[in-house]
Amino acid sequence: MEIDLVELWANMPALVKAVVVVLTLQALATIYVLVDRLILLMSSQSRSRAFAAEAGAKLAAGRFSEVAAIAKKHDKSHLASFIETGVEVFLARAEDGHDREKAAEFAKRALERKGENLSESLNRGLNILASTGSTAPFIGLLGTVLGILNAFRLIGEESSGGMATIGPAISEALVVTGYGLLVAIPTVLVFNWLSGKIAKYEAGLANAGSELVDQLEADVAVQPKQGAKKNGSDAKVPAGTGAPATAMA
């Protein structure tokens, strides 16, 4: 059986049309959030790889002031922003005269706060997907209820309950329920997939932050900013110590 959507739309009551419009807006919002988050993740991952390639060796050598300068050039990368926060707090505390362990502890706390801010930024819009996935079926059902009420109204006006009278109205109502499900099911799948992808990305950032704290606490040469107090050992990097910037590469 073929469904003429144009004819269905033309015959729908105003309230049912309003339901269809709401569902359409939800579907468009889902597509927008999906595209926006994917572009954000892909662009940040690309920039993070560029930052890791440029800053990894310097970070492993304990040249933290140079790492901070490089991170400023990659300000669109979440990883660069994350590493820059930890390094700058560490250097600032070292300049203030704190020992390595205390400065590294300050850096760890700053990374935790930065991680929360980045998580909020990365998950922006997912609440729209969650709301759409949970409400679209009920909005569609509301359209169906309104459509059936319209069918009963037609029965009362024409004093006839034949299928010729109520069939088209009921079919319009059921189509709205199907539309609600058509919006909700892909949205739930997109929400789950995107949430997992963002969670994996956040785990990579957290791992990079953990490696950075280990690096800051290690006995490596710290090169303070110009005019700052030297506060750290001049020993070389222990064998096997990797650069946190590589965690997201």
Image (tube, grey):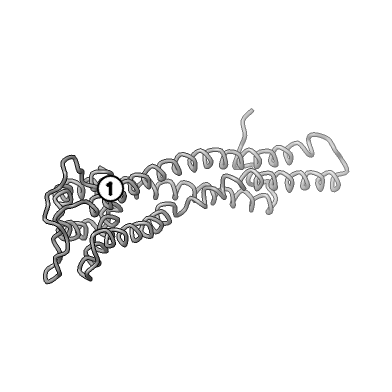
Q: Residue at x 23, y 44 (%)?
A: 246
Q: Residue at x 23, y 67 (%)?
A: 92
Amino acid type assigned to the residue bearing label 1 in the image:
Glu
Residue linked to disc 1: 211
Q: Quadrant of residue 49?
A: top left
Query: Which residue, as the protein is rendered here, is positioned at the far top?
Result: 1
Which sits in the foreground, 105 or 50?
A: 105
Q: Is residue 128 left or right of residue 52?
A: right
Q: Is residue 203 left or right of residue 97?
A: right
Q: Position of residue 217 (x, y in %)?
A: 24, 53
Q: Quadrant of the C terminus?
A: top left
Q: Residue at x 81, y 48 (%)?
A: 153
Q: How many marks?
A: 1
Q: Secondary structure at mark 1?
A: helix
Which sits in the foreground, 91 or 123?
A: 91
Q: Position of residue 64 (x, y in %)?
A: 17, 57
Local crowd size for mark 1, using a 10 Å CA cut-off: few (<14), some (14–19), many (≥20) = some
Q: Residue at x 31, y 51 (%)?
A: 209
Q: Position of residue 216 (x, y in %)?
A: 23, 54
In the displayed structure, 9 sits above or below 69; it is above
Which sits in the foreground, 60 or 141?
A: 60
Q: Quadrant of the N terminus?
A: top right
Q: Position of residue 104 (x, y in %)?
A: 28, 58
Query: Which residue, as the protein is rendered here, is positioned at the far right?
Result: 159
